Image: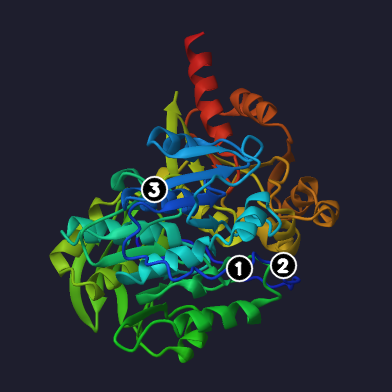
Amino acid sequence: MSSSTATDCFVPMMTPAPLAPTLTPSPTHNLDFRNVTRWRVHLLGIGGSGMSGLAAMFARRGAEVSGVDAQRSAATRRLSDAGLRVGLETEQPDLPAGVDLVVASAAVPDQHAHLLAARRRDVPILKYAQALGLLMQTRVGVAVAGTHGKSTTTAWTAYVLRSAGLDPNFIVGADVPQLGGGSGVGDGQHFVAEACEYDQSFLNLHPTHAAILNIEEDHLDYYANIDAIRDAFARFTALVPPDGVLLINGDDPNCRLVAAAAHARVESFGFGPSNLWYPRDVELVNGSYRFTIVHQDHALLDAHVALPGKHNVLNALATAALARACGADAGQIRAGLQGFHGAQRRMTLVGEVAGVRVVDDYGHHPTEISATLCALRERYQPRRLWCVFQPHQHSRTRFLLREFAGSFTHADRVIVPDIYFVRDTQRDRELVCAQDLVDRVRTTGRDADYIPDFDRIVEHLARHVAAQDVVVTMGAGNIWNVADALVARLRADRTA
């Protein structure tokens, strides 16, 4: 099957929201981030994907690290196993003694007890992105921004640079088994990091090179509208210095607009041959894409990537361009592109039992849902594709309800549990519920059901799935538990 027959997996969106309050940071008292050895660093929200990576990075650079989170998780257990002092907020009501720096995630409220204690003791306080930016400033920064694809492209770039022998530092908002986790400290000069637009966090970074993969409406609990989002991305482009490289998705009109604010050399990538980087002879082969990467109208390399989905062709282009800017040659880039198998919760095959494949994915935005379902159809060609989607945030669900409803075109059956509650107000919770989404999905002709309880979802699936079916659990919350439980249930049923 050639690329010309692949389904277009992108959808537009638009709706405004009020700005949200943010954490108040404090001066760093001239702390030198080039040497953090023997610092005592305390992290609030330490179990988050980025925060846990930052904690590990501080520890690997010689700092004494502690932290708290609202709940235990696989990330907090990994940190504890590595010797970090990690606990629950309810177990540690006060800030530990002797702390040199407090770092808080964007989700931590300004009146958190440990923040209040830090202010009383005159301990420096930084947001996660500020600390990340100060660490990046000590290296050649490589930042990956965009509404979608950041984790995959950041991890892919770090993998290519590592396989090329450039030994980068990196931090990714996901676990990456091939990299040994979501962060790493290398002896090389590069620091590759995911650049998140929420709370304008990415404006704290200091990139020498950067990529903007796409720009769409999201985080509407913070941004007022698409104009505010574009403005933030335009300010991000201005961070890249004149001697750096800014890569933009030339097929995305919002990316083209914000590139006008750039001081650095701008290079575009995309499917269209008007871009500086584009793919040629794109073919779908055994569920993933084979293509030639063209740079300045000259064939640079042939690639057959392991990651499914046409959107990963774009991610591969961005990765190749970033790696080239960092000094990797064509052969090194080719090997790294083809050897990478992805980050956790990005179309991860959890298990296969009696011909039923169970996949888990982090997608929580309409564009991500559509692209992922499209990619799964191409990869597995299932008899039926079941999607168990857990909405993430009431506000996002409400603002993008129409777009969510239209994003399940490639699914045969859709199951929706209750909305995952994070950062929302009680008013947000009153304005939309999971049943509202199910009702809207049904208007598009999809078969959709609201099943609030995870155990009941597993029971329903176990009774109805059959060989050649694919089940994907999707969402940024804890929906992965359903995938694990379903695989265990199917195995138990088979041996009973």
Residue 71, can we see it? yes
Left or right for 379, reference 10: left
Q: Which of the numbered marks, if any, corresponds to residue 56?
A: 3
Q: Amino acid at mark 2?
A: Ala
Q: Secondary structure at mark 3?
A: helix
Q: Of residues 243 and 274, which is closer to you in this image? A: 243
Q: Nearer the viewer, mark 2 or mark 3?
A: 3
First along the sequence among labels 1 and 2: 2
Q: Are marks 1 and 2 in contact (CB under 8 Å)?
A: yes
Residue 3, can we see it? no
Q: Amino acid at mark 1?
A: Asp
Q: Which of the numbered marks, if any, corresponds to residue 119?
A: none
Q: How is the image coloured?
A: rainbow
The location of residue 336, given as percent across then percent down, is 22, 57
The residue shown at (71%, 43%) is 448
- Residue that mark 1 sits on: 199
Q: Quadrant of residue 3?
A: bottom left
Cα gap from disc 1 to disc 2, whole angstroms: 8 Å
Q: Which quadrant, please, contains the N terminus?
A: bottom left
- Residue that mark 2 sits on: 20
The location of residue 147, given as percent across then percent down, is 53, 67
First along the sequence among labels 2 and 3: 2
Cα gap from disc 1 to disc 3, whole angstroms: 23 Å
Q: Amino acid at mark 3?
A: Ala
Relative to 44, residue 257 above or below: below
The residue shown at (40%, 46%) is 64
Q: Of residues 87 and 468, which is closer to you in this image? A: 87
Give neighbour class at mark 2: few <14, some 14-19, many 20+ (Cα, 10 Å): few
